């Protein structure tokens, strides 16, 4: 048996490794000139700062299995993501916490007082939010929404938040203490030498062959026992039902002689600032020391055919198109659709790795029991 895997990001790498460990040959196809997908990291030639080329990635999870798995391939350094946001001439901490609330409203509220205060601002008349904007109104009221969500979301998604589904804002975006850790997960960190090294170690196996700068043609699936496809699901079918919506990112790099902003991530919530945020990458590796610094101004726009897709939009009006692709995928023989692009969902790295491990387990079990390998390994792809 020989398997093909399309895409050398975490999804493809983990599935490849798990199959290779069981003695199967695996060919990994990657259209780019490097492995690791959008998690790719490299050293800046001028500054030697470790760059997250396609935007910063902080690993965070509560999944012990995933944490133990990824730690087999790298040394994780502790890292807490502390995001700041500039709005109307002020700088605030995100996610919204007690310090943000007191600073923004010029108050000195205790936690209980802040809970009551935010409740008084929230739109209690909205019982079932119909969109992102109403969801924010229900959570935090109009003032905090306008300051930290409206402008940023408008730039990030290219449309008014009132046109976005409420599900994008899933959790209460406020804390009633001074905790400014952006994530709540037990395990958080960044690989000491970047993500590229991690992926390289995962696919470093005698049964794995990696083919860079190589586009996998759909007809090549017949050369393999089974193919795992982690590219855009609509691309596999040559966009015959239309092009699904994605947002992509453009980056404007600058090198400076000294610390530029004093933090790793600074959001810009004002609509008159064209970029969504500035990331200063030496702060993602605080265990290193660098004289110069590298920043990236990040611009979000609609993804065209030749662009790198980052965020699936998943608007309500796209559901019919997505369902047509899912129906077509379920009729396709010898192929499984995996990962963020293959299932048209935005998922974090830990979820990506967890789903890849599960896909490998299900695949191996299917082979052992002479069952058909599933087209999808999740239940909620639609």
Image (cartoon, grey):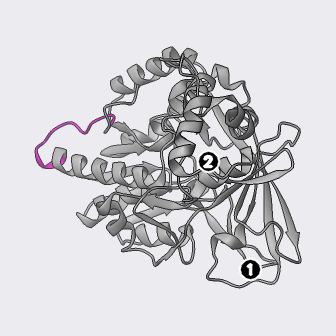
Seen at 86% across and 77% down, the residue is 258
Looking at the image, can residue 303 be seen?
Answer: no
Q: Tell me the crowding category of disc 1: few under 14, some 14 to 19, or many 20 or more residues within 10 angstroms, Cα based.
A: some
Lower position in the chain sequence, tag 1 or tag 2: 1
Residue 307 x/y as whole percent? 70, 41
Boundaries of the magenta span: 367-376
Q: Nearer the viewer, residue 124 or 196?
A: 124
Of the 4 image quadrants, the one containing the C terminus is top left
Magenta residues: mostly which secondary structure? loop
Seen at 79% across and 69% down, the residue is 294
Seen at 45% across and 76% down, the residue is 74
Q: Nearer the viewer, residue 366 or 50?
A: 50
Please identify the quarter of the rendering in which residue 174 is found.
top right
Q: Which residue carries the number 1 mark?
A: 48
Which residue is at the far left? 369
Q: Nearer the viewer, residue 6 or 202?
A: 202
Q: Is residue 235 left or right of residue 223?
A: right
Please identify the quarter of the rendering in which residue 196 is found.
bottom right
Q: Secondary structure at mark 1?
A: loop
Please identify the quarter of the rendering in which residue 254 is found.
bottom right
Asked if disc 1 and disc 2 are in contact, CB closer than 8 Å, the reply is: no
Residue 292 x/y as whole percent? 83, 79
Disc 1 to disc 2, how far (Cα)? 34 Å
Q: Which residue carries the number 2 mark?
A: 96
Mark 1 or 2: the one toward you: 2
Residue 105 x/y as whole percent? 73, 44
Q: Tell me the crowding category of disc 2: few under 14, some 14 to 19, or many 20 or more residues within 10 angstroms, Cα based.
A: many
């Amino acid at each position: 048996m020989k398997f093909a895997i399309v895409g050398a990001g975490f999804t493809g790498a983990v599935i490849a490794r798990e199959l290779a460990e069981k003695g199967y040959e695996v060919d990994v196809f990657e259209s780019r000139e490097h492995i690791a997908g959008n998690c790719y990291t490299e050293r800046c030639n001028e500054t030697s700062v470790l760059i997250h080329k396609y935007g910063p990635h902080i690993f965070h999870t509560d999944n012990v299995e995933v944490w133990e798995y990824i730690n087999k391939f790298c040394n994780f350094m502790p890292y807490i993501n502390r995001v700041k946001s500039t709005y109307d001439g002020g700088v605030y901490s995100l996610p919204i916490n007690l310090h943000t609330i007191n600073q923004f409203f010029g108050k000195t509220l205790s936690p209980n007082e802040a809970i009551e205060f935010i409740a008084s601002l929230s739109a209690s008349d909205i019982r079932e939010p119909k969109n992102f904007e109403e969801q924010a109104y229900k959570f935090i009221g109009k003032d905090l929404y306008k300051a930290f969500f409206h402008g940023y979301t408008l730039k990030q998604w290219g449309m008014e938040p009132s046109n976005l589904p409420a599900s994008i804002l899933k959790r209460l975006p406020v804390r009633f203490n001074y905790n400014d850790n952006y994530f709540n997960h037990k395990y958080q960190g960044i690989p000491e030498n970047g993500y590229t090294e991690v992926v390289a170690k995962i696919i470093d196996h005698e049964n794995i062959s990696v083919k860079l700068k190589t586009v996998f043609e759909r007809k090549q699936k017949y050369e393999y026992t089974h193919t795992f496809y982690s590219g855009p699901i609509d691309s596999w079918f040559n966009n015959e039902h239309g092009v699904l919506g994605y947002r992509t990112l453009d980056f404007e790099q600058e090198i400076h002689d000294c610390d530029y902003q004093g933090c790793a991530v600074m959001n810009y919530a004002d609509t008159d600032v064209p970029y969504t945020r500035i990331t200063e990458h030496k702060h993602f590796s605080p265990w290193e020391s660098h004289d110069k610094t590298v920043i990236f101004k990040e611009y979000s726009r609609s993804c065209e055919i030749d662009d790198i897709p980052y965020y699936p939009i998943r608007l309500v009006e796209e559901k019919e198109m997505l369902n047509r692709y899912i129906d077509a995928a379920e009729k396709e023989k010898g192929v499984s659709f995996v990962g963020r692009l293959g299932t048209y969902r935005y998922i974090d790295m830990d979820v990506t790795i967890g789903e890849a491990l599960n896909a490998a387990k299900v695949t191996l079990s299917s082979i052992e029991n002479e069952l058909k390998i599933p087209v999808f390994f999740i239940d909620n792809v639609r």
